[in-house]
Amino acid sequence: SQQGEEDPQALSIQEGENATMNCSYKTSINNLQWYRQNSGRGLVHLILIRSNEREKHSGRLRVTLDTSKKSSSLLITASRAADTASYFCAHSGGSNYKLTFGKGTLLTVNP
Amino acid sequence: NAGVTQTPKFQVLKTGQSMTLQCAQDMNHEYMSWYRQDPGMGLRLIHYSVGAGITDQGEVPNGYNVSRSTTEDFPLRLLSAAPSQTSVYFCASSYRSGGGQETQYFGPGTRLLVL
């Protein structure tokens, strides 16, 4: 399987703390994406980082990409209870237009 | 724009029954795909399409058929439902680009229970 892996599988923090989630993958990629899924809902795109980029920011989100280690991290700063959700990384490589998802990290932010 | 819509939201089937999960998008996206999500497994790609008339298999295609007669619609057919197909099904769409798969927009999902 070319499925990526998120680490940790579950993370519980207090409101105001930072949350860091990691993602590893096995193949060469064109880009890597992070998605959020609230319980019982569809996935919502958060951020896309291309293979020639090392870091990207969007609001309270910071994503890094290390293609030599085939890994990425998602940092959520000053977390809020509303950030409670599952977070998935997904990578795209080659020209087949397939997006391969990891198994996700369940983030719980306690008020 | 409605984005990506899926019907039905919930369905119960008996083993051996057939059904079609509907997916439509109004964003003129070339690429559409179907995923299933099972506990602890993340999302797994079933079938995808890069344009009208063009479909291909994903990671777990067995037991499912698709067709793409228009840009807007991408139905998923279960020919003979099995309990192993109990899952949550998500449809997604995106633009095509030369830089790999772009941002995917997901529908709300269809929860399927096969008894």
Image (cartoon, helix red, strand yellow):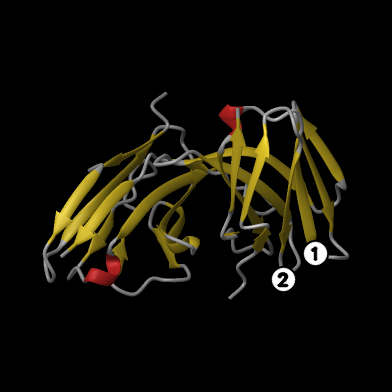
**Viewport quadrant of the N terminus of chain A:** bottom right
Left or right: where does residue B36 sit relative to residue A75? Answer: left
Q: Residue at x 88, y 65 (%)?
A: A68
- x, y percentage for residue A89? 64, 52
In the image, what residue occupies the spot 42% across and 71% down? B60
What subunit carries mark 1? A
Q: Is residue B112 above or below residue B23?
A: below
The residues bearing labels 2 and 1 have C-alpha atoms spaced at a distance of 7 Å
Are both tags, 2 and 1, on one chain? yes
Mark 1, residue position: A70
Which residue is located at x 86 percent, y 51 percent? A52
Is A51 drawn above or below residue A94 in the view shown?
above
Q: Dot 2 lies on which element? A: loop
Question: Horizontally, is A48 left or right of B92 in the view?
Answer: right
- Do residues under tags 2 and 1 come within 8 Å of each other at their CB atoms? yes
Total numbered circles = 2
Q: Is residue B55 shown above or below A82?
A: below
* Place of residue B53 in the rendered image (x, y in percent of width and height, measured from the top left): 38, 57
- The amino acid sitting under disc 1 is Lys
Quadrant position of the C terminus of chain A in the picture: top right
Query: Horizontal and vertical percent for residue A58?
Result: 75, 30
Instruction: Tell me the SS state at disc 1.
Output: loop
Residue bearing the label numbered 2: A26
**Image-based side of A100 in relation to B81, left or right:** right
Looking at this view, is A11 or A105 the one in front? A11
